[in-house]
Image: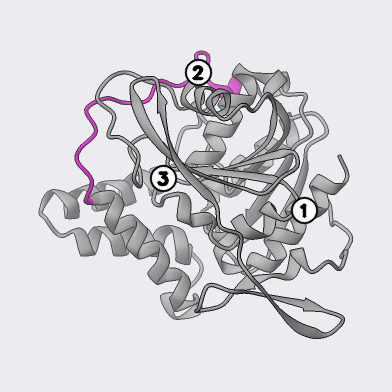
């Protein structure tokens, strides 16, 4: 595990207030900063429409959301990163405002087509949970297009989930099949946003509510008619093939499987670094946005 230097910069310490402005601390004083207005568009990708936001200039930095949420997972990062990089976030196929899958597809191929559509030859690629798995697959499939890999609370294609997670998944499916979406969402929020070692009362209620809204919207979408096609062989057997600068980020309150995956990534990707954010679980970028932003920006500044 690596501990990055605590470089003081206003971009690292910006957070959004209730009116949408960014508050930054500079020389001990609060400074209000007008948020950047992104260009939002639609990319026709492999027969699907992907909704994306782009803002800023500089080297491209792609943000890929997890499987319970949508591109607004990155609301506390997008403006901050766009002040140094060309920040790109999008709704993965089947999520947010993007198309429902109706035919076979691959997430990593969708990402390649999206970047080609945007005129991006290579980028820093950051993904959380499912998005981390997409980022890893993309790195293996198109290594020349990835200048840095940042898996956050990452999934790992080919990893066998524990019996405990399978049981939780069965409880979620049971609630959903009985039409109790509220209960299904609460199980997921307790499992992932709270984490196994904390009560709901120990987690910021604003973070819980933001995740709850995105997860509820995800479950309200039409049912997917096709499943994503992962790389074959699976990424778990090919981590040694990754030679891209890699930073693994994880919260110490996440589920044991995610902590185990973080260790696998750190151990099996040559030169990989790991940063652990204390007192956070699966949506660590939402719980500790200032610290998360600093860790990512510090890492990218070393490249």
Q: Dot 2, crowdedness within 10 Å: few (<14), some or many (≥20)?
A: some
Quadrant into which the C terminus falls: top right
> Which disc, if any, is residue 288?
none
Residue 28 in the image: x percent, y percent?
Answer: 83, 85
Q: Dot 1, crowdedness within 10 Å: few (<14), some or many (≥20)?
A: some
Residue shown at 43% from the left, 42% from the top: 91
Tell me if 219 is positioned left or right of 145 in this view. left
Quarter where residue 148 is shown: top right
The range drawn in magenta is 220-237
Q: Which residue is mark 1?
A: 297
How far separated are the C-alphas under marks 2 and 3? 18 Å
Q: Element under label 3?
A: loop
- In this view, the residue in front, 4 or 113, is 113
**Label 3–label 1 contact, CB within 8 A:** no
Residue shown at 53% from the left, 44% from the top: 89
Give the mark nearer the N terminus: 3 vs 1.
3
């Amino acid at each position: 595990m690596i501990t990055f230097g605590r470089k003081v910069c206003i971009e690292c310490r910006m957070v959004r207030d209730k009116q949408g402005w960014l508050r930054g601390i500079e020389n001990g004083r609060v400074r209000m900063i007008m948020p950047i207005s992104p260009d939002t568009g639609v990319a026709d990708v492999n027969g699907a429409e992907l909704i994306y936001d782009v803002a800023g200039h500089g080297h491209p930095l792609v943000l890929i959301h997890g499987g319970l949420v949508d591109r607004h997972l990155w609301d506390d990062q997008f403006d901050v990163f766009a002040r140094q990089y060309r920040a790109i976030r999008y709704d993965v196929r089947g999520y947010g405002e993007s198309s429902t899958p109706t035919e076979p597809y691959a997430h990593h191929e969708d990402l390649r087509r999206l970047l080609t559509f945007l005129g991006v030859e290579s980028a820093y690629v950051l993904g959380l949970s499912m998005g981390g798995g997409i980022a890893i697959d993309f790195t293996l499939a198109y290594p020349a297009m990835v200048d840095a890999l940042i898996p956050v609370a990452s999934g790992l294609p080919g990893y066998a989930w524990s019996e405990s997670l399978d049981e939780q998944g069965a409880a979620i499916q049971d609630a959903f099949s009985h039409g109790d979406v509220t209960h299904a969402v609460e199980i997921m929020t307790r499992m992932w946003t709270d984490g196994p070692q904390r009560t709901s009362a120990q987690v910021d209620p604003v973070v819980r509510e933001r995740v709850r809204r995105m997860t509820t919207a995800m479950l309200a979408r039409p049912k997917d008619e096709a499943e994503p096609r992962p790389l074959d062989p699976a990424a778990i057997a090919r981590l040694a093939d990754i030679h891209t600068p890699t930073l693994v980020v994880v919260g110490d309150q996440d589920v044991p499987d995610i902590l185990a995956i973080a260790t696998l990534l750190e151990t099996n990707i040559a030169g990989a670094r790991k940063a652990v954010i204390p007192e956070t679980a699966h949506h660590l970028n939402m719980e500790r946005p200032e610290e998360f932003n600093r860790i990512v920006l510090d890492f990218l500044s070393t490249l």
